[in-house]
Image (cartoon, helix red, strand yellow):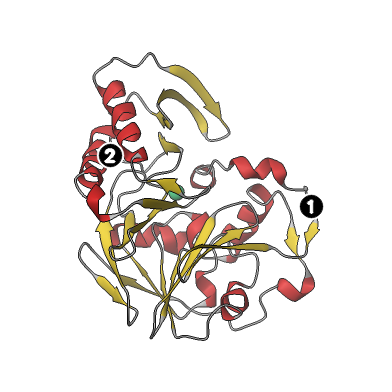
Amino acid sequence: MKNLLKLLWIPAMVLLQPGSINAQWFGVTRVAEKVWQINDHGTANIYLVEGSDSALIIDTGIGAADLVSTVRKITEKPLIVVNTHGHPDHVGANYQFEKVYIHKADAEAARNFMGDESREQMGNTMAQGATPAEGEKYAGPIHETKLVPVSEGHFFHLGNRMIEVIETPGHTPGGICLLDRENKLLFSGDNNNTLVWLFLDGCLPLSTYLQTLEKQAAMLAGFDTLLPGHGPPIASAFILDQIACVSEILDGSCDPKPYQSFAGDALFCTSGKASVAYNPENL
Ligand SMILES: [Zn+2]
């Protein structure tokens, strides 16, 4: 558990006040037509996508605060919930929902991270002990959340918009991205962050991750904007920087730097705007 909790590298952590109580736990920003980025107190991004019939919540953050009420201030439509992958900063508030979709290869990890103990650890580590103000704490039912498997090609039908599941293994075996083809948006989880960690236990070999990036590059006509699990939106051509970065690692043309973090030591390469921290034993 501890190793898995080390997975997360969040630059915004430095902005947090250790142990503080925070009104306005969530920061809500409209990032596209009927799409909101809900910043989970500097730890991770949650997205809300509203269609004419229903709304999709993409990831649930670390689970410290009342996500349901925050979403309900934006939309009254029926809610569908999906996790991009099974890491604890993306499944934390699953307990606030009866049913959550996730790829089956990440379901076990998600289940391990959906309990009180994991949430508490995430609060102490990623949120640096910050707690939500009284009115922002979740007071609704604690659900025995049912995890429902989704895979490549599944569509979430929201009425006037459809969101498609794209399998993107690498950072985790069951990582998925969600594509809003009509609006040219790709909700990319931790697959396309500025710095992607590929050295953790559970990460797939770098060569597999490269295949995922090449698959995404072949679809570049389908989306203009990446909406990542951490950080602001990114123009989609960023994926080409990621491909260059991983290719240079694999062909030996990158001169790697040592990389140290609380999750352990790794090697580190950068190309353009993309950086990857990787394990040379797992290429
Ligand atoms: Zn992750």
Query: Around disc 2, counting alpha carbons within 10 Å, would you say few (fewer than 14), some (14 to 19), or many (20 or more)?
Result: many
Q: CA distance from mark 1 to mark 2?
A: 37 Å
Residue at 37% across, 28% down: 279
Residue 245, disc:
none
| Residue 282 shows in this picture | no
Q: Nearer the viewer, residue 58 or 119?
A: 58
Residue 19, disc:
1
Residue 146: horizontal and vertical position, in percent?
Answer: 40, 77
Residue at 70% across, 72% down: 137
Reply above or below: 215 against 102.
above
Residue at 61% across, 74% down: 70
Residue 202: horizontal and vertical position, in percent?
Answer: 36, 44
On-image quarter of the C terminus? top left
Q: Nearer the viewer, residue 73 or 261?
A: 73
Residue that numbered label 2 is attached to: 209
Reply above or below: 193 against 180.
above
The amino acid type found where label 1 is placed reads Gly
The answer to whether the residue bearing label 1 lies less than 8 angstroms from the nearest atom of ligand 1 is: no
| Residue 21 shows in this picture | yes
Image label count: 2
- Quarter of the image for residue 44 reads bottom right
Q: Secondary structure at mark 1?
A: loop
Reply above or below: 258 against 37.
above
Residue 259: horizontal and vertical position, in percent?
Answer: 50, 23
Q: Nearer the viewer, residue 236 or 149?
A: 236
Reply above or below: 134 against 13.
below
Q: Nearer the viewer, residue 164 or 250?
A: 164
Residue at 30% across, 28% down: 244
Q: Which callout, 1 or 2, points at the residue further toward the start of the chain?
A: 1
Q: Secondary structure at mark 2?
A: helix
The amino acid type found where label 2 is placed reads Tyr
